[in-house]
Image (tube, rainbow, N blue to C red):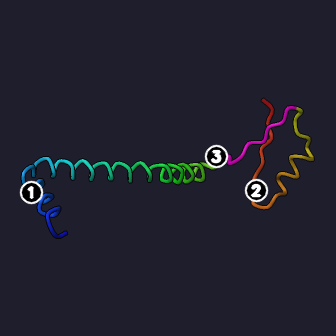
Amino acid sequence: MHGAFAKIVRRSIRGSLGRFLAIIGIVALGCGFLAGLQMSGPDMRASADRYYDGTHLWDIRLLSTLGFSDDDVQRVQDIEGIADAMPSIS
């Protein structure tokens, strides 16, 4: 920066150094909170996924108003990647 504008900026920062440092601190704190909030979502999903995998909790639930036949359950069990299927009535 050169000229009168730079001189005015330096003079205003020097005149109220405490206020300038407080604004810098507030901006840094806000950036830290924003970064933390943006990372908490993916971290929570990854943590829940590890917990569900460790406890062998079900990944998907199929519902039907008419119910599923034994053939339907067998077709679901035959899908690649399905370790187990547990039919139930509730």
Q: Marks 1 and 3, Cα distance to the nearest angstrom?
A: 64 Å
Give x and y (percent) for residue 40: 44, 49
Contact between labelled residues 1 and 2, with CB atoms less than 8 Å apart: no
Residue underneath mark 1: 11
Q: How many marks?
A: 3
* Local SS, label 3: loop
Residue lying at 53% horizontally and 54% vertically, measured from the top left: 46
* Local SS, label 1: helix
Residue lying at 13% horizontally and 58% vertically, measured from the top left: 8
Question: If the image is split into quadrants, where does the C terminus sit?
Answer: top right
Give the magenta part as a residue range: 58-65
Residue lying at 44% horizontally and 53% vertically, measured from the top left: 39
Query: Relative to 66, is 38 on the left or the right?
Result: left
Q: Nearer the viewer, residue 26 or 39?
A: 26
Residue that sits furthest to the front in the current view: 4
Q: What's the mark number on residue 45?
A: none
Q: Amino acid at mark 1?
A: Arg
Based on the picture, tell me whether residue 63 belongs to the magenta stretch: yes
| Label whose residue precedes the other's in the sequence (2 or 3) | 3
* Local SS, label 2: loop
Based on the picture, tell me whether residue 5 belongs to the magenta stretch: no
Q: Marks 2 and 3, Cα distance to the nearest angstrom?
A: 13 Å
Give x and y (percent) for residue 4: 14, 63
Residue underneath mark 3: 57
Give x and y (percent) for residue 76: 83, 51
Q: Marks 2 and 1, Cα distance to the nearest angstrom?
A: 69 Å
